[in-house]
Image: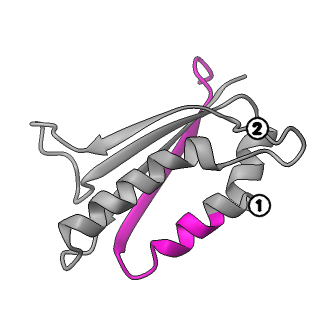
Amino acid sequence: MTIIHIVLFEFKPTTELELIQEVCKNMLALRHNCVHPRTNRPYIIESSGGRDNSPEGHQGGFSHGFVSHFANEQDRRYYIEEDPAHQAFVKSLDGIIQNVRVVDYEPGKY
């Protein structure tokens, strides 16, 4: 049961472009930096993301999106609740994120 984890960021208008780029780089680096305590290996199966370029106009202020794939509920739970690399990343967002949205789903499960 793969779990897809989608995160959307709306940065504060005062956030400099260089800092936004650093956040994006760090978000994508989590795929390699998040290591499972039992296996000592990265456990995020796949990740991607970048700046919005949709012409539809429904972004609602969100400018960047990221997608991560987890093999199971336990890995996602560890990522969200315990992983020190993820926790440090979240803390690094203090003061620069205006809004965030997270949607998770299992493919084909409605």
Task: Answer few, some or many: residues within 10 Å of disc 1's Cα (few below 14, many 20 plus, some between 14 and 19).
Answer: few
Q: In this rendered view, identify the residue nearer to me: 59 or 93.
A: 93
Left or right: 23, with 83 as reference point: left
Q: Amino acid at mark 1?
A: Glu
Name the residue at 75% across, 49% down.
Answer: 77
Name the residue at 45% across, 72% down.
Answer: 93
- Badge 2 element: loop
The C terminus lies in which quarter of the figure?
top right
Position of residue 108 relative to residue 82, above or below, is above
Position of residue 94 relative to residue 48, above or below, is below
Comparing marks 1 and 2, which lies closer to the viewer?
2
Which residue bears the numbered disc 1? 82
Q: In this rendered view, identify the residue nearer to me: 12 or 91.
A: 91
Q: In this rendered view, identify the residue nearer to me: 82 or 54.
A: 82
Is 84 a magenta residue?
no
Res 48 quadrant in image: top left
Who comes first in sequence, dot 1 or dot 2?
2
Rendering coords of residue 76 (x, y %)? 71, 44
The stretch of residues the image draws in magenta is 87-110
Position of residue 51 relative to residue 22, above or below, is above
Rendering coords of residue 19 (x, y %)? 29, 68
Left or right: 83, with 86 as reference point: right
Which residue bears the numbered disc 2? 41
Is 93 a magenta residue?
yes
- Badge 1 element: loop
Rendering coords of residue 83 (x, y %)? 73, 57
The N terminus lies in which quarter of the figure?
top right
Mark 1–mark 2 CB contact (< 8 Å): no
Rendering coords of residue 17 (x, y %)? 19, 65
